[in-house]
Amino acid sequence: MKTYKIALLPGDGIGRDVTDAAWAVLEKASSAAGFTLSGTSYPWSCDYYLQHGSMMPADGIDILKSFDAILLGAVGWPAKVPDSVSLHGLLLPIRKAFVQYANIRPHRLLPGVQGPLKADGFDILCIRENTEGEYSGAGGRVHQGTDDEVAVETSIFTRKGVERILRFGFEQARARRGKLASVTKSNAQKYTMVFWDEITQALAVEFPDVEVTSYHIDAMAARMVMVPQSLDVVVASNLFGDILTDLGAAIQGGLGFAASANINPDRTAPSMFEPVHGSAPDIAHLGIANPIAAIWSGAMMLDHLGEEAAARDVMAAIEATTARGIGAIPGKDKTDTITTAVLSALGQ
Ligand code: IPM
Ligand code: MN
């Protein structure tokens, strides 16, 4: 029987609650579809940091390298460890080391879920650049604590990095409804975003079947609220994509429904799957976190592994569950109630 090795990183807070839920669903889906998921869990988290002085061991990246995929819950517990330390010690290094340059985030309303907008017929796939741009981590501070203090943080856009994420966006658009929105701000940022626009235009020649439009980030934010149904694939830089995908989560009913995949499209290293939401320390281990974003992220993992039928089964089970009103209203149902409903919908 085909076996996939999965590294489980539940992380902090509700990350553990939702990873357990997703794993139960994925295990059931895999055995029904005739393959095996072999999971190994690592306790890397803020608690691990308090014990060991680092978010993961020095050879953490080497350990993860041998897996077929990584399923992550959430990272961060600011009362224990500053976010700037915990995220730069676990989540962000994995995305960079494994060249997971495409962060894919689907935004649509699940059946039975009431979003805040009047519009309901939208189906957006956001593709966020995930390794460079505004989050490159290049910068520094001098004269700290004095009146002369200076802080700089430099955005880094490389031809290689911009070209590959835009190409990925074009390819996704080609496989969907043929429309690509490229998010820019070249009216104000005259180096990086003009560069981004030029590469968008150059690639458009290779994809005559894709209708590409550039939108400034501010106008795109408004468009996602006013006419989200006009959008298909949206491709954006790291910061712009980060912001737009929280907006995307909001219009799809909340962060409890927002799934994501950190993909290495070249498959030179494992990809990582995680809900968009954070660790929510205030509700950690109360059994009330919505596991749907994590389960959906798990379905994206199955799809990436080539188990498309099992991925579709998991999505159908999620949809059957929310269609019955279970897990559809933020805060209403317990994690277990939702997980049990998804498990029993599987295969029906
Ligand atoms: C996300 C998160 C992270 C990011 C943070 C926690 C560093 O907001 O996955 O969207 O900005 O990438
Ligand atoms: Mn974010």
Image (spheres, grey):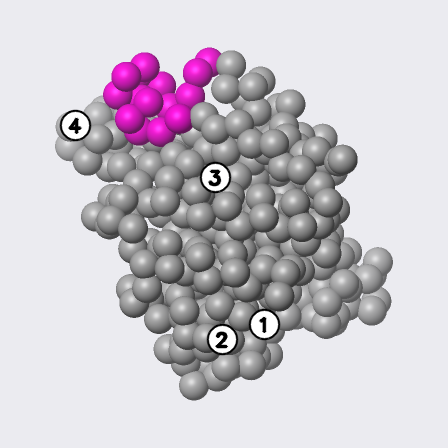
- Crowding around mark 3 (Cα neighbors within 10 Å: few <14, some 14 to 19, many 20+) is many
Q: Amino acid at mark 3?
A: Leu
133 relative to 265 in the view: left or right: left
- Residue 44 is a magenta residue: yes
Task: Tell me whether the residue at label 3 lies in contact with that at label 2, contact meaning CB atoms closer than 8 angstroms.
Answer: no
User: Under 8 Å from ligand 1: the CB of mark 4?
Assistant: no
Q: Which residue is mark 4?
A: 145
Query: Which residues lie in the magenta part?
Result: 43-58
Q: Label 4 is placed on what type of residue? A: Gly
Q: Earlier in the sequence, mark 3 or mark 1?
A: 3
Q: Amino acid at mark 1?
A: Asp
Counting residues from the start of the chain, the first of labels 1 and 2 encountered is: 1
> Measuring 21% from the left and 48% from the top, which residue is drawn there?
282
Q: Which secondary structure lies at badge 1?
A: strand
Dot 2 amino acid type = Ala
The quadrant where residue 253 appears: bottom left
